[in-house]
Image (cartoon, rainbow, N blue to C red):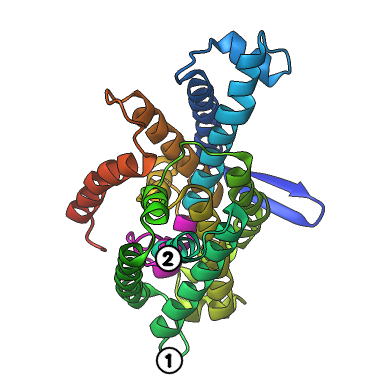
Amino acid sequence: MTALRVGVGPLRLRVERRTLAVGAVLVGVLAAAALASLMSGTVSLSPGQVLGALGGHADSERAARVMWQIRVPRVVTALAVGMALGAAGCVFQSVSRNALGSPDVIGFTSGAATGAVVQIVLIGAGPGATTAAAVAAGLLTALVVYALARKDGVSGGYRLVLVGIGVSAFAGALNTLVLARGDIDLTTRARVWLSGSLNARTWDDAWPPLAAVVVLVPALAALARHLDILEMGDDQAGQLGVHAEPTRLLAMLIGVVLTAAAVAGAGPIAFVALAAPQIAVRLTRASRVQVIVSALMGAGLLLLADLVSVHLPVRAALPVGLTTGALGGVYLLWVLSRSRSV
């Protein structure tokens, strides 16, 4: 496969032409989906009105308020959450060497959600505290999974997936217990949040996942070359100068923070982290770890799922988490029926 080599100072980057083409197409799809999302809603706006409002030349105060207080935060949250989940899923599937190794399967999403649910139901603090609780609980869950999955100084593989599934089940049970014992008003709010929704997102919801994506996705992309080598096996990686376990631990830490930030922004969104990296690999046909393309694919899947949720013929605003769960369940069955390595 032909590749382009780009150098900036001491940094050398090798990108396959097909990967670059897929990434460019995904950027175009994201732009179109974002425009469609900004146009959609109770107040319909034309493309010209949307672009005018984005440029600071809205034709009415109402259009400007709808755009900057409602729709732009929703789209930015969707993009940031989707990119965070796509990149995190790419990391965990690479580390576990398993198609099921995504944060929603191996417990990190459920763990982060537990922290947020406890914060909402038992403490009742604001968005900032909920974000901090989700990140802290996600890190604690990762520590538990890592400690239980580590054997003979090595983590990863099927053991990581199986331990994560068990921890996920425990976290889900803990969520149910907290909801059953809490105040009815707070538990209703927590249940809505647990469904995974982009409805009524504000800039307070958008900043945590956006900041995580801006800082951590480039760091993860820089680590992708070491993850490529790590997939050859720990012995081979050691011979090539890659310290397997520290690299694996760092990658998992970055993935957990991305997952927790995504959960804090929109609640637990199912199957985006599972599907995005696998679709990216099938489109690029590359053996390398595709962090950037997976992140773009995650953003595209979440935006498109949100558009489907908005335009479904139902009166209530359907949470996007239900849409991704329904579509992702079908995709998971397809993966299980087709793959011999799961």
Q: Residue at x 65, y 19 (%)?
A: 64
Q: Secondary structure at mark 1?
A: loop
Mark 2 belongs to which amino acid? Thr
**Going 27% across and 26% down the picture, which residue do you hit?**
314
Which image quadrant for residue 224? bottom right
Residue span colored magenta: 87-109
Q: Determine whether 97 is above or below 197 in the image.
A: below
Residue topped by disc 1: 152
Q: Residues within 10 Å of mark 1 (few under 14, many from 20)?
A: few
Residue 4 screen position, x and y as percent:
63, 42
Residue plotted at (43% across, 45% down): 280
Q: Residue furthest left?
A: 337
Asked if residue 40 can be seen in this view, the reply is: yes
Q: Quadrant of residue 11?
A: bottom right
Which corner quadrant holds the C terminus?
Answer: bottom left
Q: 243 or 220, which is in the foreground?
A: 220
Amino acid type of the residue that numbered disc 1 sits on in the rendered structure: Asp
Q: In the image, 215: left or right of 77?
A: right
- Earlier in the chain: of badge 1 and badge 2, it is 2
Q: Determine whether the residue tagged by mark 2 lies in a helix, strand or loop.
A: helix
In this figure, which residue is indicated by the disc labeled 2?
114
The residue sitting at the bottom extreme is 152
What's the mark number on residue 221?
none
- Residue 276 lies, in percent from the top left, at 41, 46
